[in-house]
Image: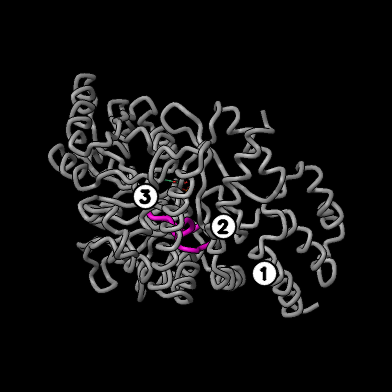
């Protein structure tokens, strides 16, 4: 069969998948044992035959889709994964055929230019100056800039490498003596301590400070942490603030934190993997008040910007810091050349890199900035309405008013009960939710990303949870 015929087969299947998922009729999650899935999909036979095409392709895709987690389903509430806009899937088809790894301009000029454009657009949303689509892509030009990476974890690592280079540029060559200290709040994402491990800073040299609900305590708390770090003869170089935290979706007060960082010569990295998208909404951008004072920001498009994974921006207030973060020789790539665009390879851990900007641009071009902002506002508002609803239902408890689309709640009973309730919900297949520890207790956790989820679905979830809490004991 021709390529076009196969595309039609797949697009028919996907169209039906999208409609069925949005209707909420099929199971949202269908977890079978690995071996059973391998057999159901007939993987060994396909490997041997090597002829997946036409009707066998249709059957394969149909079976595959049946075994996916349906993110467009109204009951899909578990994780921070974008519900992808179909326009981005089309962009990924183009990407898959063209396969232009674009960190070297000559290997993908269209993709590289789109990345530069998208990065500059994100930079402008932070409130930083970009030099008319120049600073973000051109090395060693003053101004803000950035790079797209395969995920927030990699962006956090890259930001910390840049911070470390700025602090002490001998470490790249000579290694780390174990005397560096990184500061992060107790709520930061695990990729921060992981980055410290990877970079040889050491997990034990990540000093946690607790975010006090009263903002006035911020300087004091970080100050106490700094005293401890200096007493232990360590050299603090950076602080990571969460905007927002993964478990609860709470934003840390960036303006106050930035002040302390400035006073103490610390690089401020804001991990906005989930929550930076609030910058697109006039209503919610004040959650990140002070972000423009940061040195770097991680922003995942594959969480709240309807973009399929992965697509993260690492943005820096001074692009030069990123330009000097990594040092490598590779005669086949790094050499002087005359070209009409810029390489971004020196700004990332990656060498071959997908055309990540294209997927985000496709969503932007389909929804417009306004459409994306409306989507974010809808999801945040729904989380707030759900909080109010759950607070009014006896037997349910929410520890915190939501600040974005993440809401934690629990049913009266011990921690193990919350886990049993979740297991049963997943086995039922109507709802997919996660859990998180807040304070000392485990809570059920929802992340409202599907545009199909309505308050009625969440009311149904609340009563199902209450019902299960009686039968799961
Ligand atoms: C605050 C925060 N930072 C970083 C990450 C990691 O991002 P990624 O999954 O894109 O690597 C996450 C993921 O949930 C997150 O919530």
In front of the other: 170 or 150: 150
- Dot 1: few (<14), some (14–19), or many (≥20) neighbours within 10 Å? few
Q: Reading the chain from its start, which is encountered first: label 1 or label 3? A: 1
Q: In the rendered image, which residue does mark 3 sit on?
A: 403
Residue drawn at x 35%, y 58% as measured from the top left? 278
CA distance for labels 2 and 1: 19 Å
Q: CA distance from mark 1 to mark 3?
A: 30 Å
The label number, if any, that marks residue 19 in the structure image: 1
Residue matched to label 2:
456
Depth check, mark 2 against mark 1: the one in front is 2
Q: Position of residue 241 (x, y in %)?
A: 30, 42
- Mark nearer the N terminus (2 vs 3): 3
Contact, CB < 8 Å: mark 1 with mark 3?
Answer: no
Which quadrant of the rendered structure holds the N terminus? bottom right
- Residue in view at x 34 percent, y 64 percent: 280
Q: Residue at x 38, y 73 (%)?
A: 370
Locate residue 310 relative to residue 320 in the image: left or right: right
- Do callouts 2 and 3 mark residues in contact (Cβ within 8 Å)? no
In this rendering, position of residue 213 left or right of residue 467: left
Whole-percent x, y for residue 305 in the image:
45, 62
Q: Which element is circle 1 on?
A: helix
Q: For residue 466, say whether it is visible.
A: yes
Q: Which residues are magenta?
A: 299-312
SS for dot 3: loop
């Amino acid at each position: 069969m021709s390529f076009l015929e196969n595309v039609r087969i797949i697009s028919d299947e996907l169209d039906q998948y999208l409609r069925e998922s949005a209707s909420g009729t099929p199971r949202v999650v269908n977890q079978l044992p690995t071996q059973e899935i391998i057999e159901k999909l007939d993987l060994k036979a396909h490997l041997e035959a090597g002829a997946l095409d036409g009707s066998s392709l249709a059957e394969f895709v149909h079976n595959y889709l049946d075994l996916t987690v349906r993110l467009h389903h109204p009951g899909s509430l578990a994780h921070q994964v974008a519900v992808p806009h179909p326009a981005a899937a089309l962009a990924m088809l183009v990407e898959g055929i063209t396969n232009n790894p674009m960190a070297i301009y000559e290997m993908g000029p269209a993709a590289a230019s789109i990345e530069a454009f998208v990065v500059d657009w994100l930079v402008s949303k932070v409130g930083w100056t970009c030099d008319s689509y120049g600073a973000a892509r051109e090395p060693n030009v003053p101004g803000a800039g950035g790079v797209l990476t395969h995920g927030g974890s990699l962006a956090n690592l890259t930001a910390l490498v840049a911070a470390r280079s700025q602090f002490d540029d001998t470490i790249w060559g000579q290694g780390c003596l174990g005397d560096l200290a990184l500061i992060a709040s107790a709520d930061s994402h695990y990729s921060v301590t992981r980055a410290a491990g990877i970079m040889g800073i050491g997990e034990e040299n990540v000093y946690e400070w607790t975010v006090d609900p009263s903002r006035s305590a911020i300087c004091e708390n970080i100050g106490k942490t700094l005293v401890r770090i200096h007493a232990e003869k360590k050299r603090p170089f950076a602080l990571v603030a969460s905007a927002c935290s993964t478990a609860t979706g709470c934003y840390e007060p960036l303006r106050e934190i930035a002040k302390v960082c400035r006073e103490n010569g610390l690089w401020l990295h804001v991990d906005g993997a989930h929550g930076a998208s609030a910058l697109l909404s006039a209503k919610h951008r004040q959650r990140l008040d002070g972000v423009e004072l940061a040195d770097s920001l991680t922003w995942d498009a594959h969480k709240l910007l309807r973009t399929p994974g992965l697509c993260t921006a690492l943005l820096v207030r001074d692009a030069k810091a990123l330009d000097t973060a990594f040092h490598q020789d590779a005669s086949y790539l790094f050499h002087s050349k005359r070209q009409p665009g810029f390489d971004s390879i020196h700004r990332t851990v990656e060498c071959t890199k997908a055309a990540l900007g294209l997927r985000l641009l496709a969503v932007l071009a389909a929804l417009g900035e306004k459409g994306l902002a409306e989507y974010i506002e809808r999801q945040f508002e729904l989380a707030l309405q759900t909080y109010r609803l759950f607070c009014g239902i006896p037997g349910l408890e929410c520890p915190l008013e939501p600040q974005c689309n993440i809401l934690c709640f629990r049913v009266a009973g011990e921690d193990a009960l919350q886990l049993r309730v979740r297991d049963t919900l997943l086995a039922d297949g109507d709802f997919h939710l996660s859990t998180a520890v807040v304070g000392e207790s485990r809570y059920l956790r929802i992340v409202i990303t599907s545009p199909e989820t309505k308050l009625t679905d969440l009311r149904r979830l609340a009563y199902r949870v209450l019902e299960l809490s009686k039968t799961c004991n």
